[in-house]
Image (cartoon, grey):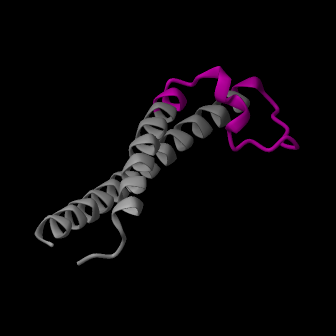
Amino acid sequence: MKICGPKYALCGLILSVWGIFQLLLMGIFFYTKSVALVEDLPIEEEETFSKATDFYAAADRGYKQNAYNCWIAACIYVLTFLFSGHQFYINSRSSLSV
């Protein structure tokens, strides 16, 4: 069943590949606790920590949660890739039979 045209399906394929690649890498970098991504952690600035270990524990939880979020989003992009690939295949098959 055709839902979108060939150009839209091709655009979806390209964007999905880019999204999968970027989000997998970002998930890896969050999982390895990259210092460059510390500004993206879900820690409030107003939050006060009585000990440094409390801050490190909150940062570790934030890194892990962001890594999982990136990997979940990459899986959603895989679904988008499969849908776009199916639409591209359907469109290319129907254009050959015409």
Of 94 and 55, nearer the camera is: 94
Of 89 and 39, nearer the camera is: 89
In the picture, measured across the screen, residue 27 lies left or right of residue 2, that is right
Answer with the quarter of the image where residue 1 lies: bottom left
Q: Is residue 1 above or below residue 25?
A: below
In the picture, measured across the screen, residue 97 lies left or right of residue 67, that is left
In the image as oriented, which residue stretches furthest toward the front?
98
Question: Where does the image place residue 31, in percent across and percent down from the top left?
Answer: 49, 30
In the picture, measured across the screen, residue 91 lies left or right of residue 69, that is left
Q: Which residue shows up at 69% across the image and 29% down it?
A: 38
Question: Where does the image place residue 56, in percent across and percent down from the top left?
Answer: 67, 27
Q: How many marks?
A: 0
Magenta-highlighted residues: 28-53
In the picture, measured across the screen, residue 72 lies left or right of residue 66, that is left
Answer with the quarter of the image where residue 94 lies: bottom left
Of 91 and 14, nearer the camera is: 91
Asked if residue 64 lies in the magenta stretch, the reply is no
Q: Which residue shows up at 58% across the image and 38% down it?
A: 61
In the image as oriented, which residue stretches furthest toward the right?
46
Question: Where does the image place residue 18, in percent across and percent down from the top left?
Answer: 45, 41
Q: Which residue shows up at 80% across the image and 44% down it?
A: 44
In the image as oriented, which residue stretches furthest toward the left?
97
For the C terminus, the image quarter is bottom left
